[in-house]
Image (spheres, helix red, strand yellow):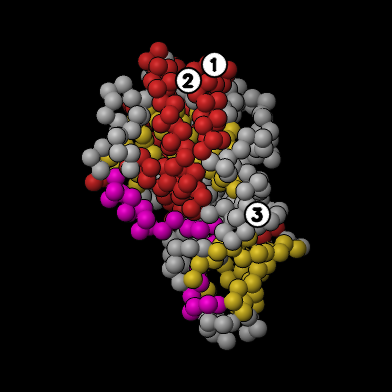
Amino acid sequence: MHVWIDASGEGANAEVVDVGTNGTITLNIRADAGTRFLQWFQFHVYGEPGVRLRFRILNAGEAMAPEWRDYRVRSAVMDESEFCCLPTRFDNGVLEFELTMQAPRHQIAYFAPFPSWRHQSLVDAVSLHPLGRHEHLGETLGKRQVELFEVRSVRSDAPHVWIVARQHPGEVMAQWFALGFLDFLLNCKEGTSANYFVIPNANPDGAFEGRHRTNAAGVDLNRAWNQEDCTACPEVALIKKRMSQQGVDFFLDVHGEEALPYVFVVDPEGPARNTREVSEPIAMFKRLLLDLNADFQIEKGYPSADGADLSLASNFVAEAFGCPSLTLEMPFTDTEQTPDEKRGWSPERSRRLGADCAKAIEKISSHMTARRRSMPWVIAQSCAEERQLFSYPVGSASISKNP
Ligand SMILES: [Zn+2]
């Protein structure tokens, strides 16, 4: 039996321990270099069609979310874009699953990867759109670009909406979400009511290197927003700089959640959440999204924290700009109340959620305009203001939440 594993190339992550003659393939997941975070895996398997293979991931019990409850591995034939779900067993720290080869090559991953051709076609679509603009914000440590996609409104007083996706590179559904979000905006026949600033992949080095949680320097970007020295996380510095030039009236930080089977948002945790300018648009957004998208719910999510951790993007932006600011989480498994037996949580559902979020934001944009006029952004206008912001007391973060 000729079977081999290719764990090279963009986004790949697997270390082959053994390929047995009986069709059992033993692997480890590589931790993000310089850290103990491991979760994301991705590789190709080559073999004869019809052969039944058994995979064992030995160090799955050391993963960041080590329960693997109801987890199903994603598999696609050759380069087909449709991924199906393979059931898994988790026992004694080892994750196991089986695959019958239907073609000479299958792709296997923790979640359906976002192909680079899709990214490139999105660059083209935005660049060619009369109200679209594609911009390089600057370089990462790995010499890749942090890319910003803009869709401008024809309204002169339009608010500024920011979407940041995939700070955690293994949370690929966030980039699928951004694709759906931008698709909706680009197809608005009358133009949009808000100006949109979308970063579909905030961590291109991490995504390329097959990391789950960190950038090329091993930094968790969503724990770095209140750092004064961004030498090791230029991605955050570039986004904050552009935000400060542009202003922010609504912010959504898009993530994937490894354990919880829900789509939910997390309110900002600082004093800004108690202001009407922040709380009312957030309440409206949730009501609209509940009507638009059956996967979204507001009953289940993370427990609320004791204080605001300003190292998190959504907390930082809420306090810095005094604007509605949310973290949005999608499951890696499936939704409890709207399960899809065949595909689980999928790229298609992530895209639909992205489009529905764009619809909801469009509907509340008139309220955001009023707020922005009366409350301009405050971040980084002066060093003194910024230091004041950085020194805000940080609360204790619950270990059960990993936004
Ligand atoms: Zn995340």
Give the mark toward the camera: 2 or 1: 1
Q: Quadrant of residue 355?
A: top left
Q: Which residues are magenta?
A: 101-126
Q: Nearer the viewer, residue 25 or 227?
A: 25
Q: Is residue 92 magenta?
A: no
Q: Amino acid at mark 1?
A: Thr
Tag 1 or tag 3, which sits nearer the N-term? 3
Residue, disc 2: 322
> Gap between marks 3 and 1, in whole Å?
39 Å
Q: Amino acid at mark 2?
A: Gly
Residue 67, above or below 254: below
Residue, disc 1: 275
Q: Residue at x 32, y 42 (%)?
A: 186
Q: Residue at x 53, y 20 (%)?
A: 280
Crowdedness of circle 2 by 10 Å Cα count: few (<14), some, many (20+)? many
The number of discs equals 3
Q: Secondary structure at mark 2?
A: loop
